[in-house]
Structures are given as structure tokens and as C-alpha cells.
């Protein structure tokens, strides 16, 4: 095998689509950006690039059960933390309107 055939391209940055796939979805990437866990290393007219190391740090935080989603946001897929669940209403004393 020659050196010409064994050449590999090492990507040090990921575009938003690739970064979203690496984190599990575009919504997760957006939440990480809103939580200020990550910011693009290159942000020009139509180009955004995220560092692979920053994506790895976000992934480690998510793996340690941290959530980039704020308490007021609904997590994509309809899963909500317990503190956002609806409270039980008292049905024995109905409120009368009138």
C-alpha cells in the first residue's frame, strides 16, 4: 500500500448537522448552545463549525445525567421531568361558575 492510498482526512470540526447527529439530535445541540455548554468555533455568514472536543465535553455531561434543557422547556419526544408533571386536581369539590 502506498502513502497515497492510506491518506485519511481527520476532521477537527463538525457542522451543525453532524454535531446534532453526534449528540442525538438537532434539538439537543440547540439546547446545549442555549445552555452555553457549547459555541461554534467558526461562525460566519452561512458557516457554523463546532469543535470535536466541545462536542465530546457535551456528550460527557449528558452521559453524567446532566440535562441541557431548562426546567421550563419540554424535552423532545414528550418526556418531561417529574417537577413539570401536572398536579392532581381535587374532584370532590367542583368549582361552580356563575
Image (cartoon, rainbow, N blue to C red):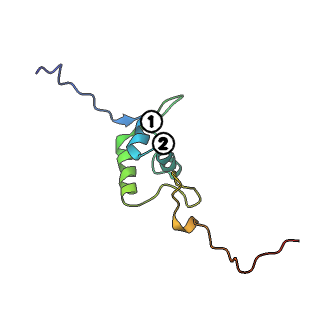
Q: Residue at x 61, y 67 (%)?
A: 86
Whole-number angstrom distance, CA of label 2 to CA of label 1: 7 Å
Badge 1, how many Cα within 10 Å: few under 14, some, many 20+? few
Q: Residue at x 35, y 41 (%)?
A: 52
Compared with 96, 48 (above or below) is: above
Q: How many numbered marks does the figure carry?
A: 2
Task: Kindly identify which numbered label has been placed on residue 62.
Answer: none
Position in image of residue 49 (x %, y %): 43, 35
5 displayed left or right of 56 = left
* Contact, mark 2 vs mark 1 (Cβ under 8 Å): yes
The N terminus appears in which quarter of the rendering? top left
Badge 2, how many Cα within 10 Å: few under 14, some, many 20+? some
Looking at this view, name the residue that lies furthest to the bottom: 92
Label 1 SS: helix
67 displayed left or right of 95 = left
Residue nearest the observer in this picture, 33 or 86: 86
Position in image of residue 14 (x %, y %): 39, 36
Q: Upstream in the sequence, badge 2 or badge 1? A: 1
Compared with 12, 96 (above or below) is: below
Q: Which residue is mark 1?
A: 17
Task: Kindly identify which numbered label has been placed on residue 26.
Answer: 2
Label 2 SS: helix
Position in image of residue 24 (x %, y %): 41, 46
Amino acid at each position: 500500500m502506498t502513502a497515497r492510498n492510506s491518506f485519511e482526512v481527520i476532521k477537527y470540526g463538525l457542522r451543525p448537522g453532524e454535531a446534532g447527529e453526534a449528540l442525538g439530535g438537532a434539538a439537543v445541540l440547540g439546547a446545549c448552545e442555549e445552555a452555553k455548554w457549547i459555541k461554534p468555533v467558526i461562525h460566519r455568514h452561512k458557516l457554523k463549525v463546532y469543535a470535536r472536543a466541545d462536542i465530546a465535553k457535551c456528550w460527557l455531561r449528558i452521559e453524567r445525567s446532566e440535562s441541557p434543557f431548562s426546567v421550563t422547556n419540554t424535552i423532545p419526544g414528550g418526556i418531561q421531568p417529574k417537577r413539570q408533571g401536572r398536579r392532581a386536581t381535587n374532584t370532590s369539590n367542583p368549582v361552580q361558575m356563575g
